[in-house]
Amino acid sequence: MSKIEIKQIAIKHFNQFGYDGTKMAQIAEEAGIRKQSLSYHYPTKKDLLIEVYQEVIEEEQAFIRQYFEEHKGKSLEKLLYDFLTEHKNRFLTKPNVTLMYSLSFITPLDVNDFLLSQFRLYLATLKEVIGSCFTKHKCRISAEECTIGFITILDGLDIQLVYETRQAYERVQRITWDIFWKGIQ
């Protein structure tokens, strides 16, 4: 069993049972290895979560940069609206993204500082890339204010994904986007 497979199983367990409910013995059992073998790679559940979460953050930072580079020819409105939709799709189909957002709202105490510092790195990348988009386009308000507004919408939409449903996300996305877009034009 490779470390990659162990981490995939761990992500599944963290998403299903939460950090406190996840047991190293269950991860080892599902991985088909002894708990002692798992402990060789990850002495504690905290060590496992830290490695997994850091990799998830790095992957999502790369995704943001890649997405905006690949779609830079779109109009600003379409680029950003489609990003919100892609963001939802990633949350619903990629367990690592689900983990990142779920733990950003419900952070276990013994890893709180680390997770928050990592999530802030993700947010910094998001703000940098979104801010760059607004800097290149003329809006009624400053690029910084547009970026803050967009990130705030994204935060609110994330709550819909973590605590509500895909349908709630899509409804709130349509409503808030219309208000936001009209407000910055």
Image: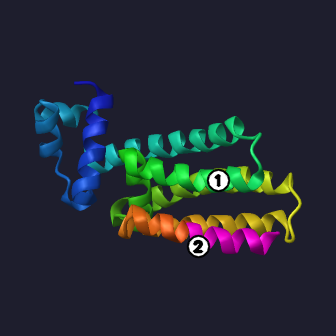
* Residue 4 in which image quadrant: top left
User: SS at mark 2?
Assistant: helix
Q: Residue 104 bears which disc, if any?
A: none
Is 81 part of what is drawn in magenta?
no
* Residue 138 in which image quadrant: bottom right
Work out which quarter of the rendered image holds the N terminus and state it. Answer: top left
Work out which quarter of the rendered image holds the C terminus and state it. Answer: bottom right
Q: Is residue 181 visible?
A: yes
Q: Left or right: where does residue 153 sit relative to residue 135?
A: left
* Residue 163 in which image quadrant: bottom left
> At 64% across and 56% down in the image, what residue appears?
81
Task: Measure the alpha-carbon separation of dots 2 and 1.
Answer: 22 Å
Is 176 part of what is drawn in magenta?
yes
Residue 157 position in % (x across, y down):
51, 67
Within-10-Å neighbours for mark 1: few <14, some 14–19, many 20+: some
> At 85% across and 55% down in the image, what residue appears?
135
Q: Looking at the image, is mark 2 or mark 1 earlier in the sequence?
A: 1
Q: Amino acid at mark 1?
A: Leu
Q: Residue 175 bears which disc, if any?
A: 2
Q: Is residue 158 visible?
A: no
- Majority secondary structure in the magenta region: helix
User: SS at mark 1?
Assistant: helix
Q: Residue 126 bears which disc, if any?
A: 1
Q: Which stretch is magenta?
A: 174-185
